[in-house]
Structures are given as C-alpha cells and as structure tokens.
C-alpha cells in the first residue's frame, strides 16, 4: 500500500545519504525501485565506512576555496612580478661577482641587497603556489 501510494503521488524521491568519502549527499530518484537499490548500496557503504579507522579517510578532503577579485588579479599579475624579481636578482648576482673582484669593501652591503632580492623571489613563488592551489 505504501509503495503504491508513493508511486502514484510522487514523481521524485529525495534521499539523504553519504558518498564514498563519507561526505553527506542528497540524491534524487524517480521511483521507489531506484530508492530500494540506492538504500541497499547505502547500507553496504556505511558498513564499509564504519570499518575504516576513525579520523583517517581513504583520501584527504581538500576544499579549494574561490579566490577573491583581488587575489585573482594578483594571480594574473604574478608571473610578470616573478620575472621582474628574478631579473633583479640576476642583476644583483652579476654585480656581486664584479664587486668581489673590484671593490670588496662594498660587498657586505651588496650581499644584503642580494639576500633581500632572493627572499622576495621565494615569497612570490610561495604566494603563487598558494593562490594557484598547488
């Protein structure tokens, strides 16, 4: 009687279940027969998930967040900024080699500039990696 009633009165059944990673999921079905198959699969899946160690899933779930407008703009300009920083670093490296042979006294101050330029290149690469989700 309940099956007949559901088939006659509904054109869609919504079911709350879980996916393979244990995440909650809403599933739409067209009839009670489809729901029964889905329900059997859910019982098996929940038993499988319950047998896994607590706190450890098969794959870590990493949600990729959407970038803000400013972050998207920063990401678009990042490649050019990295090229500029690398060019400045290359120039400072060449100047450091020249100073080492010609003016060793000013080498200490120039080495600080070189370290700052290297840190900036590393910061830009880290930020690029963060924004691009790699």
Image (spheres, rainbow, N blue to C red):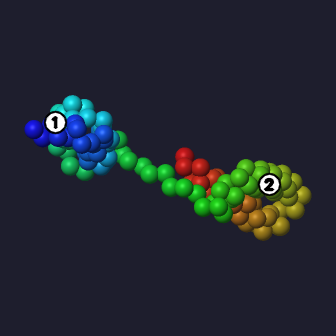
The residue mark sitting in front, 1 or 2, is: 1
Residue 28 appearing in the image: yes
Q: CA distance from mark 1 to mark 2?
A: 71 Å
Q: Is residue 130 above or below residue 105?
A: above
- Per the image, label 2 sits on a secondary structure element best described as helix
Query: Looking at the image, is mark 1 or mark 2 earlier in the sequence?
Result: 1
The foreground one among 104 and 92 is 92
Q: Quadrant of residue 103?
A: bottom right
Residue under the image location 71 percent in, 52 percent down:
76
Which residue corresponds to mark 1? 4
Nearer to us in this view, 107 or 40: 40
Give the class, few, some or many, for how many residues have Cα within 10 Å of label 1's Cα (few <14, many ≥20): few
Q: Name the residue carrying label 2.
A: 84
Q: Residue at x 20, y 49 (%)?
A: 54
Is residue 16 shown left or right of residue 113?
Answer: left
Q: Position of residue 100 (x, y in %)?
A: 82, 56
Please tell me whether mark 1 sits on a helix, a strand or a loop.
helix
Dot 1 and dot 2 residues touching (CB under 8 Å): no
């Amino acid at each position: 009687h309940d099956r007949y009633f559901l088939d006659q009165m509904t054109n869609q059944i919504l079911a709350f279940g879980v996916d393979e990673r244990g995440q909650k999921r809403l599933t739409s079905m067209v009839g009670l027969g489809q729901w029964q198959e889905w329900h059997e699969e859910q019982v098996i899946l929940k038993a499988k998930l319950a047998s896994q160690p607590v706190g450890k899933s098969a794959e870590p779930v990493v949600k990729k967040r959407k970038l803000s407008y400013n972050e998207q703009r920063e990401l678009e300009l990042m490649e050019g900024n990295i090229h500029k920083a690398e060019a400045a670093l290359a120039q400072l490296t060449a100047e450091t080699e020249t100073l080492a042979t010609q003016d060793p006294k000013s080498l200490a101050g120039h080495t600080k500039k070189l370290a700052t330029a290297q840190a900036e290149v590393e910061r830009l690469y880290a930020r690029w990696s963060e924004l691009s989700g790699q």
